[in-house]
Image (cartoon, rainbow, N blue to C red):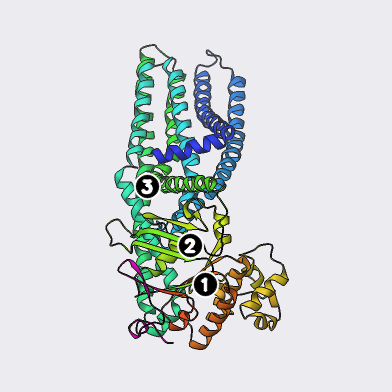
Amino acid sequence: MRSSLRIIWLLQKEEPLAFWGGLFLAFLPAAAGIALLAVSGYFITATAIAGLSAGAIAFNTSSAASSIRLYASMRIFGRYIERVITHDATFRFLANLRSGVFRGLVARESNGTLSQRSATALSRVVSDVDQLDGLFLRLVVPLASATIITGLTLVILWQYSPMASIALGAVQAAGLTVLAKSGGHRQKAQARKLNAARDALRVRVSDLVRGRRDLSVFGGLEQQRVAALKAVNQLDDVQEQNELTDMRNQAVVSTMSQVMVAVTFLFAAYSYQQGQMELKHIALFAFVALALPELLISLANSAGSWSKMSGAADRVRSLLTVGQDNEALQNARSNSETPSFEVGKDALNLKDIHFAYTPKAAAILDGVDLALPTGSRTVVIGPSGAGKSTLAAIVARLQTPQSGAIQIGGVELSGMAEDKLRAALTVVGQRTQIFHSTIAENLRVAREDATDAELWEALAHAGLKELVEGRQEKLETRLGEGGLGLSGGEGRRLALARAYLRNPEIWIADELTEGLDHATADKVLASFRAMTKGKTVLMVSHRASELEGADRVLVLEDGKLGEVNLPLSEEIKGRLRDD
């Protein structure tokens, strides 16, 4: 509830005129609708009574007819204007909200606290933000209208029959209570099941589509298809339960309408018998009792979605908080010092670094110290899972250690501005992201203002110039998804060319040649060494060929970092691959 109120408050704060104006305009057509039904019923009844009296009772039909036309116009035009204002304000608010949510998602991923697959997390964020459009449009607006109009109606009808007014208000309050309880703990559990079922379906279908080749080769296609169909059936079951809840809410409103008409009519008839009202006013009460439950119809539709909106608000608020904290941190870092890389001083310095993925898990890094002098080349080796890639990610501020201090060029890493950090340091590795775009646009990810001449220079240093020149579109050659159109080695060298455009002082290479054949790996290494000549290099490796030219070789094992003597002993060489 608190998160939902926070989202509503943000909307009111960002769009105050549209927020309050929309509520007022929503009130007018709803009130006009009830007045239209009541006056119409009153008009028909009064006309009938006047006719039956054979002229004994006079009735002004023009006044009633004018009121009907006025209320009908107010209902039509008021609803149109209200929809324009409230929907426009909501969609503009959601557009801004998405920016804050994506900032939080990026910050959470960079902190290493994103527990979901990236595609699942992105899909959930999009779904959550879309879900919040109903918070104002389908909950706040109809609830405010129903509450205000019910209150005003009861005050007006009180003048004719207090007992009938009380009965009408009691039934309306009972309906609101039933609808409110329909969004309780049971529905929250149902909403969680719905989200889980949707996530499961996305994952199954994504795995089926992306892995269809391997699944076909190894005979797992049918098994994955069955798993996807099972996820579809589970989602259908959960959605069916939600639809049943909506149908029950609709049934409650329909039953209330009948009960309210009957009870109100009885009390109004009793008041007429006691001489407290005229006969024609009984119809007024009856038609008002028939119209008031209509205010709850939209609420009945929203009651079943309340738990989903509430859960979405909790997740969105959490991401907004992370994003705001991260933005404040980035603002605080904006005036940080520029790192200085002088010969004879350390370009990188780590002191007593401790890191574990969860509080109860064993430490991956346990008191690691590391100093890299400017211009040095250091290689870290060790068994798989020892934490080499984690160490590289921490240095690049892609992971955050639980304790310890890191300095780059004499500046604290935690307080360094993002642009200064990325200008000073870059990471290349086995996981190369090639975008579905042109070669030029893939390179300009590193430097948007890079000229074509600078792109060709970067490609030349990466050993790709001749390859790209041989393409018909050259720099404008469009690559497919995931770098389709380049081999694995060519993709690595394109990533090197992109890094070269940044011209950083510190290069971090994480398993740079992993998965490449010997000849391709040699080409990639040759390009890398040419680019990083005179730079500070930290390499994470399993291959003997990557140790050539290293000033130091360190072994990471059991959370500790130790230096080994050069040339390497046979025991250390035995840990490395020769391919």
Numbered badge on residue 379: none
Q: Is residue 231 above or below residue 292?
A: below
Residue 130 can be seen, yes or no: no
Residue 131 can be seen, yes or no: yes
Of 420 and 165, the residue lying toward us = 420
Numbered badge on residue 432: 1
Q: Residue at x 56, y 33 (%)?
A: 16
The quadrant holding residue 304 is top left
Span of residues in magenta: 554-579
Report the mark closest to the observer, 2 or 1: 2
Q: Residue 180: image x %, image y %?
A: 35, 37
Specify which label sits upstream in the sequence, 2 or 3.
3
Q: Look at the numbered disc 3 and give the secondary structure of its residue.
A: helix
Q: Is residue 552 above or below residue 449?
A: below
Of 339 and 134, the residue lying toward us = 339
**In the image, what residue type sits under mark 1?**
Thr
For disc 3, the marked residue is 247
Q: What is the C-alpha distance between the residues marked 2 and 1?
A: 24 Å
Q: Residue 254: image x %, image y %?
A: 38, 39
Q: Residue at x 48, y 35 (%)?
A: 9
Q: Residue 339: image x %, image y %?
A: 55, 56
Numbered badge on residue 348: 2
Q: Residue at x 65, y 76 (%)?
A: 459
Q: Residue 340: image x %, image y %?
A: 56, 58
**In the image, what residue type sits under mark 3?**
Met
**In the image, what residue type sits under mark 2?**
Leu
Specify which label sits upstream in the sequence, 3 or 1.
3
Q: Is residue 411 above or below residue 526?
A: above
